[in-house]
Image (tube, rainbow, N blue to C red):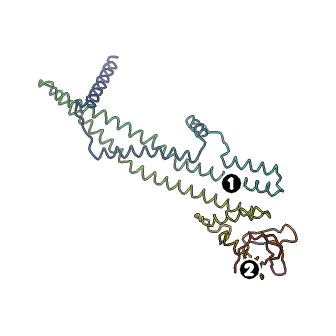
Amino acid sequence: MDFNVKKLAADAGTFLSRAVQFTEEKLGQAEKTELDAHLENLLTKAESTKQWTEKIMKQTEVLLQPNPNARIEEFVYEKLDRKAPSRLNNQEQLSQYMIDAGSEFGPGTAYGNALIKCGETQKRIGGAHRELVQTGAINFLTPFRNFIEGDYKTISRERKLLQNKRLDLDAAKTRLKKAKVAEARASAEQELRITQSEFDRQAEITRLLLEGISSTHAHHLRCLNDFVEAQMTYFAQCYQYMLDLQKQLGSFPTTFASNNNQSALTTMQSVSPPSISASAPLPAASNSVVTSGFSELKAASGNRKARVLYDYDAANSSELSLLADEVICVYSVPGMDSDWLMGERGNQKGKVPITYLELLN
């Protein structure tokens, strides 16, 4: 009991001494021991690393999960060490709406079929996004969070201890200056030696921890590379899924394919993501060039060779079925719809949509 009372009294005395020293420093009434420049630079680097790590981590969470309510729920479940209930992401929810709408309008109709195909693609994109979220959480967010909640907490604790040791040292220096009698000076000198030794030891411990920030940067760099690779995979998958969808939509014998698809296909030409060199063929010319070429053909007599861009199944006996990459002869017939030409393959002939063709000569 006496030991506990003495310890509490000693702790109270130490706290009071530090408080007095801190207050006098703020008022300019006491000198302050400055840390060496190297240690100050390490402390600044650590604080900057902590602040930017938090900002990047929080914004990455927003990127991967835009819904703030969902983020809060996931945070709560994580703190409770429980698995959050599974929910559809934005792409998967859109997929469900599109598929349900397509089913109601009828899979046999052009619009209903297109909605279902779009919904299926959105579902695949949703699955890819789910993989991105999982990979990003494991390989990027978790290491960043471990630094904030682990290494930096240790650094903060040791930094606080260093601050206390510095206050003790400066308080001992102040008491030595105020000591008048020899006995008091001897006691103050002894206290100063002890506090100086404790301060130097704590400064070394803090310095060693802070020098580990460079290793933290190296680790975070590897995590950043992993995250970039995950994003690259995700966007490449999305690009390929959309190319496949564009090809499926283009197979519909409807006027919207002529009006809308060409500009989208032309835009996709300029995108060349990694690892997708063998994607579905795209038109080699811009919309204006293609339109001009076909207009000239319609205005002139004779025929031209054309490469088929996509498979096309004839809707009736007046049309000609096409296979992607084959070369056929095409020519115009007076009175024919502006979106169509006559096509010939050997002894076979029939109408073909111009949006499926690329003129060769």
| Residue in the picture at 74% in, 50% down | 98
232 left or right of 207 in image: right
> What x and y, as percent, mark residue 264?
67, 62
| Residue in the picture at 24% in, 29% down | 171
Mark 2, residue position: 305
Mark 1, residue position: 124
| Residue in the picture at 69% in, 48% down | 92
Considering every residue shown, the one lying at the far right of the view is 317
Callout 1: SS: helix
Q: Are marks 1 and 2 in contact (CB under 8 Å)?
A: no
Callout 2: SS: strand
Q: What amino acid does circle 2 point to?
A: Lys
Considering every residue shown, the one lying at the far bottom of the view is 302
252 left or right of 282 in image: right
Res 112 label? none
Q: Quadrant of the rendered structure where residue 240 is?
A: bottom right
Considering every residue shown, the one lying at the far left of the view is 182
Tell me how far mark 1 sits from mark 2, CA to CA.
38 Å
Compared with residue 133, is residue 339 higher up or lower down, i.e. above or below?
below
Q: Quadrant of the rendered structure where residue 189 is?
A: top left
Residue nearer the viewer, 256 or 117: 256
Compared with residue 311, is residue 360 higher up or lower down, i.e. above or below?
below
Mark 2 Cα-neighbour bin, 10 Å: few <14, some 14–19, many ≥20: some
Compared with residue 348, is residue 273 higher up or lower down, i.e. above or below?
above
> What x and y, as percent, mark residue 64?
58, 47
> What x and y, as percent, mark residue 307?
72, 75
Q: Quadrant of the rendered structure where residue 155 is?
A: top left
> What x and y, as percent, mark residue 349?
84, 77
Compared with residue 150, is residue 253 higher up or lower down, i.e. above or below?
below
Q: What amino acid does circle 1 point to?
A: Arg
